Image (spheres, grey):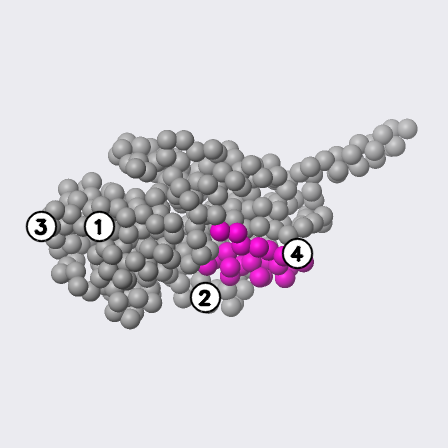
Amino acid sequence: MFRRHLLGALAASAALPGAATASSWPSRPIRLVVTFPPGGGSDIIARLIAPAMQARLGQPVIVDNRPGAGGTLAAAMVAKEAADGHTLLVANNAPIVISPAMFPSVAYDPLGSFRHLAYVGAFPFVLVVRPDVPARTLDELIALARARGGLSYGSGGTGSVGHIVGLMLARDSGAAFEHVPYRGSGPMVTDFLAGVFPMAIDALPQQLQHMRSGAVRAIAVTAPGRVGLIPDVPTMAELGRPGLTGENWVGLSAPAGVPDAVAERIAAVVAEAAALPEVVEKLDAMGLNRAPMPPAAFAAMVTQQVANWQPAIRAAGLTAN
Protein backbone atom coordinates (compact mmCIF):
# COMPACT_ATOMS: atom_id res chain seq x y z
CA MET A 1 0.00 0.00 0.00
CA PHE A 2 2.79 2.44 0.96
CA ARG A 3 4.70 1.62 -2.24
CA ARG A 4 1.60 2.30 -4.39
CA HIS A 5 1.04 5.65 -2.69
CA LEU A 6 4.70 6.58 -3.11
CA LEU A 7 4.73 5.72 -6.81
CA GLY A 8 1.51 7.64 -7.32
CA ALA A 9 2.92 10.70 -5.60
CA LEU A 10 6.07 10.59 -7.68
CA ALA A 11 4.07 10.29 -10.89
CA ALA A 12 1.87 13.22 -9.90
CA SER A 13 4.85 15.41 -9.03
CA ALA A 14 6.51 14.61 -12.36
CA ALA A 15 3.40 15.88 -14.15
CA LEU A 16 3.44 19.24 -12.39
CA PRO A 17 4.58 22.33 -14.30
CA GLY A 18 8.25 23.03 -13.62
CA ALA A 19 8.92 19.44 -12.64
CA ALA A 20 10.96 18.79 -15.79
CA THR A 21 14.04 16.64 -15.58
CA ALA A 22 17.25 16.72 -17.59
CA SER A 23 16.05 13.70 -19.56
CA SER A 24 12.66 15.24 -20.44
CA TRP A 25 14.02 18.68 -21.31
CA PRO A 26 13.65 20.12 -23.86
CA SER A 27 10.25 18.95 -25.03
CA ARG A 28 9.70 21.82 -27.50
CA PRO A 29 11.68 24.63 -29.19
CA ILE A 30 13.85 26.86 -27.00
CA ARG A 31 13.80 30.65 -27.27
CA LEU A 32 16.88 32.76 -26.60
CA VAL A 33 15.46 36.23 -25.95
CA VAL A 34 17.94 38.99 -26.84
CA THR A 35 17.42 42.40 -25.25
CA PHE A 36 18.70 44.39 -28.25
CA PRO A 37 18.22 44.31 -32.05
CA PRO A 38 20.29 42.13 -34.38
CA GLY A 39 23.92 43.14 -34.78
CA GLY A 40 24.90 43.76 -31.15
CA GLY A 41 27.24 41.67 -29.01
CA SER A 42 24.51 39.72 -27.21
CA ASP A 43 22.78 38.95 -30.50
CA ILE A 44 26.02 37.77 -32.12
CA ILE A 45 26.75 35.43 -29.21
CA ALA A 46 23.21 34.04 -29.24
CA ARG A 47 23.44 33.29 -32.96
CA LEU A 48 26.84 31.63 -32.53
CA ILE A 49 25.78 29.25 -29.76
CA ALA A 50 22.21 28.55 -30.90
CA PRO A 51 23.14 26.06 -33.67
CA ALA A 52 25.46 24.15 -31.36
CA MET A 53 22.78 24.00 -28.66
CA GLN A 54 20.23 22.82 -31.20
CA ALA A 55 22.53 20.04 -32.42
CA ARG A 56 22.98 18.78 -28.87
CA LEU A 57 19.40 19.12 -27.69
CA GLY A 58 17.46 17.90 -30.71
CA GLN A 59 15.04 20.84 -30.61
CA PRO A 60 15.07 24.13 -32.54
CA VAL A 61 16.84 26.97 -30.70
CA ILE A 62 15.36 30.27 -31.86
CA VAL A 63 16.89 33.72 -31.33
CA ASP A 64 14.14 36.22 -30.50
CA ASN A 65 15.14 39.91 -30.49
CA ARG A 66 12.98 42.03 -28.16
CA PRO A 67 14.64 45.48 -27.86
CA GLY A 68 13.43 48.45 -25.85
CA ALA A 69 13.81 50.40 -22.60
CA GLY A 70 17.39 49.40 -21.89
CA GLY A 71 16.61 45.71 -22.18
CA THR A 72 13.92 45.81 -19.50
CA LEU A 73 11.07 44.89 -21.84
CA ALA A 74 12.70 41.60 -22.80
CA ALA A 75 13.77 40.84 -19.24
CA ALA A 76 10.26 41.48 -17.91
CA MET A 77 8.80 39.20 -20.56
CA VAL A 78 11.17 36.33 -19.75
CA ALA A 79 10.64 36.75 -16.01
CA LYS A 80 6.93 35.99 -16.51
CA GLU A 81 7.50 32.88 -18.64
CA ALA A 82 7.16 29.36 -17.27
CA ALA A 83 10.27 28.27 -15.37
CA ASP A 84 10.74 25.16 -17.49
CA GLY A 85 13.91 26.06 -19.38
CA HIS A 86 12.27 26.67 -22.74
CA THR A 87 12.55 30.48 -22.64
CA LEU A 88 15.94 31.92 -21.70
CA LEU A 89 17.20 35.48 -21.43
CA VAL A 90 20.47 36.38 -23.14
CA ALA A 91 21.36 38.46 -20.11
CA ASN A 92 23.84 41.31 -19.94
CA ASN A 93 24.68 44.35 -17.84
CA ALA A 94 21.92 46.56 -19.22
CA PRO A 95 18.70 44.81 -18.06
CA ILE A 96 20.22 43.10 -15.02
CA VAL A 97 22.61 45.64 -13.48
CA ILE A 98 22.15 49.10 -15.00
CA SER A 99 18.57 49.70 -16.15
CA PRO A 100 16.86 48.66 -12.89
CA ALA A 101 18.75 51.50 -11.17
CA MET A 102 17.96 54.06 -13.87
CA PHE A 103 14.29 53.49 -14.67
CA PRO A 104 11.62 54.54 -12.14
CA SER A 105 10.37 50.96 -11.96
CA VAL A 106 10.87 47.66 -13.72
CA ALA A 107 8.57 44.67 -13.71
CA TYR A 108 11.12 42.21 -12.34
CA ASP A 109 13.81 41.74 -9.72
CA PRO A 110 17.22 41.35 -11.44
CA LEU A 111 18.25 38.78 -8.83
CA GLY A 112 15.01 37.29 -7.51
CA SER A 113 13.23 36.91 -10.85
CA PHE A 114 16.00 34.95 -12.56
CA ARG A 115 18.39 32.10 -12.12
CA HIS A 116 21.65 33.16 -13.76
CA LEU A 117 23.06 29.99 -15.26
CA ALA A 118 25.67 30.25 -17.98
CA TYR A 119 28.39 32.89 -18.36
CA VAL A 120 29.86 33.24 -21.85
CA GLY A 121 32.23 36.21 -21.57
CA ALA A 122 32.54 39.99 -21.51
CA PHE A 123 33.01 42.66 -24.18
CA PRO A 124 35.13 45.73 -23.57
CA PHE A 125 33.71 49.04 -24.73
CA VAL A 126 35.59 51.56 -26.79
CA LEU A 127 35.21 55.34 -27.13
CA VAL A 128 35.57 56.18 -30.81
CA VAL A 129 35.34 59.37 -32.86
CA ARG A 130 34.98 60.08 -36.54
CA PRO A 131 38.22 60.96 -38.37
CA ASP A 132 37.16 64.59 -38.79
CA VAL A 133 37.04 65.16 -35.02
CA PRO A 134 40.16 67.17 -34.08
CA ALA A 135 41.01 65.15 -30.96
CA ARG A 136 43.35 62.19 -30.59
CA THR A 137 43.42 61.82 -26.81
CA LEU A 138 40.79 61.81 -24.10
CA ASP A 139 42.03 65.12 -22.71
CA GLU A 140 41.82 66.69 -26.15
CA LEU A 141 38.28 65.35 -26.58
CA ILE A 142 37.21 66.82 -23.24
CA ALA A 143 38.78 70.16 -24.18
CA LEU A 144 36.95 70.07 -27.51
CA ALA A 145 33.63 69.40 -25.79
CA ARG A 146 34.20 72.39 -23.52
CA ALA A 147 35.19 74.63 -26.42
CA ARG A 148 32.14 73.67 -28.46
CA GLY A 149 29.71 73.76 -25.58
CA GLY A 150 29.25 69.98 -25.75
CA LEU A 151 29.56 66.92 -27.98
CA SER A 152 26.93 64.28 -28.68
CA TYR A 153 27.67 60.57 -28.48
CA GLY A 154 25.77 57.52 -29.61
CA SER A 155 25.27 54.27 -27.72
CA GLY A 156 23.39 51.03 -28.17
CA GLY A 157 20.59 52.24 -25.93
CA THR A 158 19.44 53.83 -22.73
CA GLY A 159 20.94 51.94 -19.82
CA SER A 160 23.75 50.41 -21.87
CA VAL A 161 27.34 50.39 -20.64
CA GLY A 162 28.11 52.98 -23.32
CA HIS A 163 25.39 55.25 -21.98
CA ILE A 164 26.66 54.99 -18.41
CA VAL A 165 30.30 55.56 -19.37
CA GLY A 166 29.29 58.71 -21.24
CA LEU A 167 27.26 60.00 -18.31
CA MET A 168 30.13 59.37 -15.92
CA LEU A 169 32.60 61.00 -18.31
CA ALA A 170 30.44 64.12 -18.38
CA ARG A 171 30.08 64.13 -14.60
CA ASP A 172 33.77 63.55 -13.89
CA SER A 173 35.15 65.96 -16.52
CA GLY A 174 32.63 68.76 -16.19
CA ALA A 175 32.25 68.81 -19.99
CA ALA A 176 28.90 68.38 -21.72
CA PHE A 177 28.40 65.06 -23.50
CA GLU A 178 24.87 64.60 -24.81
CA HIS A 179 23.57 61.05 -25.13
CA VAL A 180 21.93 59.93 -28.37
CA PRO A 181 20.26 56.58 -27.57
CA TYR A 182 19.34 53.92 -30.11
CA ARG A 183 17.45 50.67 -29.98
CA GLY A 184 20.64 48.69 -30.41
CA SER A 185 24.18 49.14 -31.62
CA GLY A 186 23.48 48.22 -35.26
CA PRO A 187 21.33 51.25 -36.13
CA MET A 188 23.53 53.51 -34.01
CA VAL A 189 26.66 52.55 -35.95
CA THR A 190 24.89 53.28 -39.26
CA ASP A 191 24.10 56.84 -38.18
CA PHE A 192 27.50 57.34 -36.54
CA LEU A 193 29.33 56.43 -39.74
CA ALA A 194 26.97 58.73 -41.67
CA GLY A 195 28.04 61.67 -39.52
CA VAL A 196 24.92 62.18 -37.41
CA PHE A 197 27.08 62.62 -34.26
CA PRO A 198 30.85 62.88 -33.74
CA MET A 199 31.54 60.11 -31.21
CA ALA A 200 30.25 56.82 -29.89
CA ILE A 201 30.82 54.59 -26.88
CA ASP A 202 30.16 51.08 -28.07
CA ALA A 203 31.09 47.43 -27.58
CA LEU A 204 34.33 46.57 -29.38
CA PRO A 205 32.85 44.00 -31.85
CA GLN A 206 30.64 46.61 -33.48
CA GLN A 207 33.51 49.05 -33.97
CA LEU A 208 36.51 46.82 -34.68
CA GLN A 209 36.16 46.61 -38.46
CA HIS A 210 35.58 50.36 -38.72
CA MET A 211 38.64 51.04 -36.58
CA ARG A 212 40.73 48.81 -38.84
CA SER A 213 39.41 50.50 -41.99
CA GLY A 214 40.07 53.98 -40.63
CA ALA A 215 36.38 54.94 -40.66
CA VAL A 216 36.60 55.70 -36.92
CA ARG A 217 39.44 56.43 -34.50
CA ALA A 218 39.69 54.89 -31.03
CA ILE A 219 40.40 57.12 -28.05
CA ALA A 220 40.18 54.66 -25.13
CA VAL A 221 38.85 51.27 -24.00
CA THR A 222 36.87 50.61 -20.84
CA ALA A 223 38.48 47.23 -20.12
CA PRO A 224 40.50 46.69 -16.92
CA GLY A 225 43.62 46.17 -19.07
CA ARG A 226 44.68 46.70 -22.65
CA VAL A 227 42.88 44.58 -25.22
CA GLY A 228 44.96 42.22 -27.34
CA LEU A 229 43.14 43.06 -30.57
CA ILE A 230 43.86 46.78 -30.14
CA PRO A 231 46.98 46.91 -27.94
CA ASP A 232 47.82 50.52 -28.82
CA VAL A 233 44.55 51.90 -27.43
CA PRO A 234 44.92 53.01 -23.78
CA THR A 235 42.48 52.11 -21.04
CA MET A 236 40.35 54.69 -19.24
CA ALA A 237 42.25 53.86 -16.06
CA GLU A 238 45.57 54.63 -17.74
CA LEU A 239 44.15 57.99 -18.76
CA GLY A 240 43.28 58.86 -15.19
CA ARG A 241 39.62 57.78 -15.31
CA PRO A 242 39.46 54.46 -13.41
CA GLY A 243 35.79 55.03 -12.64
CA LEU A 244 35.02 54.58 -16.34
CA THR A 245 36.17 50.95 -16.34
CA GLY A 246 33.44 48.49 -17.26
CA GLU A 247 32.66 45.61 -19.60
CA ASN A 248 29.43 44.14 -20.90
CA TRP A 249 29.15 40.53 -19.78
CA VAL A 250 26.85 38.13 -21.60
CA GLY A 251 25.27 34.95 -20.27
CA LEU A 252 22.07 32.94 -20.21
CA SER A 253 19.49 33.25 -17.44
CA ALA A 254 16.23 31.42 -16.84
CA PRO A 255 13.11 32.45 -14.94
CA ALA A 256 13.49 31.76 -11.23
CA GLY A 257 12.27 28.34 -10.23
CA VAL A 258 13.75 26.40 -13.11
CA PRO A 259 14.41 22.85 -11.84
CA ASP A 260 17.96 22.08 -10.77
CA ALA A 261 18.38 19.28 -13.30
CA VAL A 262 17.31 21.53 -16.18
CA ALA A 263 19.46 24.41 -14.94
CA GLU A 264 22.51 22.15 -14.81
CA ARG A 265 21.81 20.84 -18.29
CA ILE A 266 21.43 24.34 -19.74
CA ALA A 267 24.73 25.44 -18.17
CA ALA A 268 26.52 22.35 -19.50
CA VAL A 269 25.16 22.68 -23.04
CA VAL A 270 26.02 26.39 -23.24
CA ALA A 271 29.54 25.67 -21.96
CA GLU A 272 29.97 22.96 -24.60
CA ALA A 273 28.69 25.25 -27.36
CA ALA A 274 30.90 28.15 -26.32
CA ALA A 275 33.98 25.90 -26.21
CA LEU A 276 33.69 24.61 -29.79
CA PRO A 277 36.81 25.60 -31.76
CA GLU A 278 34.83 27.35 -34.49
CA VAL A 279 32.86 29.33 -31.90
CA VAL A 280 35.97 30.18 -29.87
CA GLU A 281 37.69 31.45 -33.00
CA LYS A 282 34.82 33.84 -33.74
CA LEU A 283 34.46 35.00 -30.13
CA ASP A 284 38.17 35.71 -29.88
CA ALA A 285 38.06 37.62 -33.16
CA MET A 286 35.36 39.83 -31.62
CA GLY A 287 37.51 40.64 -28.61
CA LEU A 288 35.36 38.73 -26.12
CA ASN A 289 37.09 38.11 -22.82
CA ARG A 290 36.29 34.45 -22.25
CA ALA A 291 36.70 33.02 -18.77
CA PRO A 292 35.05 29.68 -17.86
CA MET A 293 32.76 30.22 -14.90
CA PRO A 294 30.48 27.69 -13.18
CA PRO A 295 26.86 28.71 -12.58
CA ALA A 296 27.38 29.48 -8.89
CA ALA A 297 30.28 31.80 -9.68
CA PHE A 298 28.29 33.51 -12.43
CA ALA A 299 25.35 34.10 -10.09
CA ALA A 300 27.72 35.46 -7.44
CA MET A 301 29.31 37.81 -9.99
CA VAL A 302 25.90 39.17 -11.01
CA THR A 303 24.95 39.68 -7.37
CA GLN A 304 28.20 41.53 -6.71
CA GLN A 305 27.80 43.78 -9.74
CA VAL A 306 24.25 44.70 -8.74
CA ALA A 307 25.54 45.54 -5.25
CA ASN A 308 28.41 47.64 -6.64
CA TRP A 309 26.87 49.44 -9.62
CA GLN A 310 23.28 50.18 -8.64
CA PRO A 311 24.02 52.29 -5.54
CA ALA A 312 26.65 54.21 -7.50
CA ILE A 313 24.23 54.87 -10.38
CA ARG A 314 21.51 56.08 -8.01
CA ALA A 315 23.92 58.17 -5.95
CA ALA A 316 25.14 59.88 -9.13
CA GLY A 317 21.55 60.69 -10.05
CA LEU A 318 21.85 58.90 -13.39
CA THR A 319 18.41 58.32 -14.92
CA ALA A 320 17.02 57.02 -18.18
CA ASN A 321 15.73 60.49 -19.06
For the C terminus, give its image quadrant.
Answer: top left
- Res 2 quadrant in image: top right
Is 250 left, or right, of 134 in this rendering?
A: right
Residue pointed to by mark 1: 152
Q: Are marks 2 and 1 in contact (CB under 8 Å)?
A: no
Q: What secondary structure is marked by label 4?
A: loop
For label 2, the crowd category at 10 Å Cα-Cα, with few meaning under 14, some 14 to 19 and many 20 or more, is some
Is 310 left, or right, of 236 in this rendering?
A: right
- Foreground pick, 164 / 73: 73
Residue pointed to by mark 3: 147
Is 171 left, or right, of 78 in this rendering?
A: left
- Foreground pick, 190 / 133: 190
Point out the residue furthest to the right here.
1
Q: Amino acid at mark 3?
A: Ala
Q: What secondary structure is marked by label 3?
A: helix
Residue pointed to by mark 4: 59
Span shown in magenta:
44-65
In front of the other: label 2 or label 4? 4
Q: Earlier in the sequence, mark 2 or mark 4?
A: 4
Q: Distance from label 2 to label 4 (Cα)?
A: 24 Å
Q: Distance from label 3 to label 2 (Cα)?
A: 41 Å
